[in-house]
Every structure is written in C-alpha cells, then in structure tokens.
Amino acid sequence: MAKEPSSPALGWYGVLAFELGWIVAAGSLLGYYADNYFGTSPLLTAIGSIGSAAGAFYRLIAALNRASRYRENGHDAEHDDRKD
C-alpha cells in the first residue's frame, strides 16, 4: 500500500508550486517592461513568458527527480539541507 504524503511533504510541494508560479510571473513582467522600454510590444513579453516557463519546467523536473532519488534511498526530500 502506498504511503500517504506527510504534512511536510505537502508543504514542500506547495512551496515548489508557488516558486514556479513566481518564476513565470517574473519572466512575463520583465518582458512586459522591456517591451514598454524598447517599444517592441508583444515580442519580449512572449520571449520572457516562454523562457521563464521553460526554466520553471526544468526546475520542476530537477526537483522531482531529486525527491524521487532521495525517496529511493530512504530519505525525505523535504528535509534536504542542500540548496539548489
């Protein structure tokens, strides 16, 4: 039977989701302000949005792979002291 996620595990996933949302929002806003500054509207907003979404997706895959690796070794990823 599969082990139910603990409260700290759910917190870790919540923090990860919040972080990924801010990555995409920051890239979109930077692109928007760059468009206003350079007068290249919607080009830099689209590039910022797509680039930050790709970065967020990469970050998600790396974090989930790390969590999976730690769980296979009998550890909990949310208690990892390493910083990315």
Image: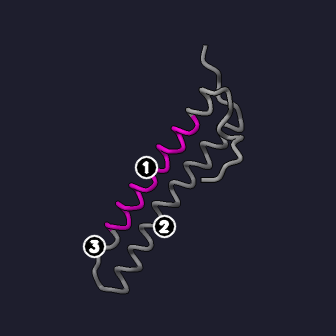
Give coordinates of residue 58: x percent, y percent: 44, 50
Considering only vertical position in the picture, is 35 above or below 48? Answer: below
- Picture quadrant where residue 73 is located: top right
User: Which of the two discs, 3 and 1, labels the residue nearer the N terminus?
Assistant: 3
What's the magenta bit mostly, secondary-structure-wise? helix
Question: If you read the primary sequence from the N terminus, does the residue marked by circle 1 or circle 2 appear first?
Answer: 2
**How packed is label 2: few (under 14 Cα within 10 Å), some, or many (20 or more)?**
some
Residue occupying image coordinates x 32% and y 73% = 44
Residue type at the position of mark 1: Phe
* Between discs 2 and 3, the one toward the N terminus: 2
Q: Please tell me the numbered disc located at residue 43.
A: 3
Q: Amino acid at mark 2?
A: Ala
Element under label 3? Answer: helix
Label 1 element class: helix
Image quadrant of residue 10? Answer: top right
Q: Nearer the viewer, mark 3 or mark 1?
A: 1
Direction from residue 63 to residue 46 in the image, left or right: left
- Residue closest to the eye, 59 or 38: 59
Q: Could you tell me if the residues under marks 1 and 2 are in contact, i.e. CB atoms within 8 Å?
A: no
Give the alpha-carbon distance from disc 1 to disc 2, as whole Å.
Answer: 14 Å
Going 50% across and 60% down the picture, which residue do you hit? 23
Q: Label 1 belongs to which residue?
A: 57
Q: Measured along the vertical axis of the image, is residue 69 above or below residue 23? A: above
Left or right of residue 16, residue 78 in this image? right
| Label 2 – label 3 distance at C-alpha | 16 Å
Q: Which span is picked out in magenta?
A: 46-67
Seen at 54% across and 44% down, the residue is 63
Q: In the rendered image, which quarter is residue 45 located in?
A: bottom left
Q: Is there CB contact under 8 Å for labels 3 and 1?
A: no
Q: Give the label on residue 26, or none.
A: 2
